Image: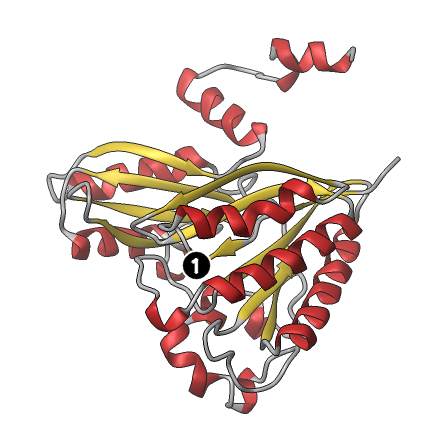
């Protein structure tokens, strides 16, 4: 059976539709690649793309998209609520079918090496592809963001895994890696107090003593006049979406603030939603085999 990987690159462009369409075009036109979803957010000023495909197809389309993004995005002019360090900010590869994590790490290294040489771009490896424990966490690599990377890359402890110790003049630096499926999940609050959102995020995320597989920051959604707790759930099998939702609800109540909605960015495994349904409905001994569509798919 064929090998299938998922790739979820994040680009630092969420406002210019023409640029966005140029960036995603290689994912639409490359053989062996299926574009599943792409969503852009103006407040975050960020584009998140989700596709699956063969290792070679993903590698080819990713390098083409990187070249386009580097050409059309100038980080010196970029502003947005989401932390970022480069035009092509982060590129994770995830095993889907007949692919081991070791093979996902291998393709991450191949893309990183070729991109560094072709685009004169400093590249770091993270998560399962990290070359040392200090580089496993994306937030640690990206700390200081684009504005601080010029000095950061020249420090011995932050020498890029591929490429030179000088940031690209307009594209910054990039992080590439391999990891489990990540769920990007945001919870909106009925307040415009960003400090409050950041305080709740600190309590929810693992680094602040919160949920083990949760990363969280406060985000100002200025166009809507509200704030949100923006999260990356790095292992949904061990920290569920409902746990994050309920913890935010609990912490927000202390301030007299309510949750007014939540959103998912990109795609997520069905099991993540099954866990939520099982919890809130109180279903005992629930199985994915009880889902009608799953049973139908077994016969196709």
Q: In terms of image quadrants, where is residue 241?
A: top left
Residue at 43% x, 87% y is 151
Residue at 63% x, 12% y is 293
Residue 267 vs 119, above or below: the answer is above
The answer to whether 293 appears left or right of 173 in the picture is: right
Q: Position of residue 259 (x, y in %)?
A: 23, 34
What kind of element bears circle 1?
A: loop
Q: Position of residue 128 (x, y in %)?
A: 66, 60
The answer to whether 20 appears left or right of 76 in the picture is: right
Residue 61 vs 174, above or below: the answer is above
Q: How many dots with numbers?
A: 1
Residue 180 vs 277, above or below: the answer is below
Residue at 33% x, 69% y is 77
Would residue 182 be visible to someone looking at this image?
Answer: no
Q: Position of residue 89 (x, y in %)?
A: 50, 62
Would residue 19 be visible to someone looking at this image?
Answer: yes
Judge by depth and name the residue closer to the eye, 127 or 118. Answer: 118
State the residue lying farthest toward the right: 1
The answer to whether 6 appears left or right of 135 in the picture is: right
The answer to whether 81 appears left or right of 87 in the picture is: left
Q: Position of residue 207 (x, y in %)?
A: 40, 61
| Residue denoted by label 1 | 12
């Amino acid at each position: 059976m064929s090998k299938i990987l998922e790739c979820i690159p994040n680009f630092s462009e969420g406002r210019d539709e023409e640029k966005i369409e140029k960036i995603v075009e290689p994912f639409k036109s490359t053989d062996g690649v299926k574009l599943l979803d792409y969503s852009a957010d103006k407040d975050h000023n960020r584009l998140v793309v989700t596709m699956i495909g063969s290792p070679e197809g993903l590698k080819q389309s990713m390098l083409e998209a990187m070249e386009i993004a580097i050409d059309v995005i100038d980080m010196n002019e970029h502003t947005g609520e989401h932390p970022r360090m480069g035009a092509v900010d982060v590129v994770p590869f995830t095993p889907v079918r007949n692919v081991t994590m070791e093979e996902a790490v291998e393709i991450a290294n191949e893309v990183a090496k070729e991109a560094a040489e072709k685009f004169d771009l400093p590249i770091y490896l993270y998560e399962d592809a990290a070359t040392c424990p200090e580089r496993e966490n994306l937030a640690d690599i990206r700390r200081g963001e684009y504005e601080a990377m010029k000095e950061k890359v020249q420090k011995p402890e932050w020498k890029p895994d591929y490429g030179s110790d000088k940031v690209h003049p307009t594209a910054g630096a990039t992080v590439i890696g391999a990891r489990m499926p990540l769920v990007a999940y945001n919870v909106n609050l009925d307040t415009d107090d960003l400090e409050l959102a950041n305080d709740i995020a600190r309590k929810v995320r693992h680094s602040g003593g919160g949920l083990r597989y949760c990363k969280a920051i406060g985000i100002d959604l200025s166009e809507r006049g509200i704030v949100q707790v923006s999260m990356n759930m790095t292992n949904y099998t061990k920290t569920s979406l409902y746990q994050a939702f309920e913890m935010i609800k609990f912490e927000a109540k202390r301030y007299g603030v309510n949750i007014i909605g939540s959103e998912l960015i990109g795609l997520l495994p069905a099991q993540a939603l099954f866990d939520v349904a099982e919890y809130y409905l109180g279903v005992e001994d629930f199985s994915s085999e009880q889902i009608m569509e799953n049973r139908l798919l077994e016969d196709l």
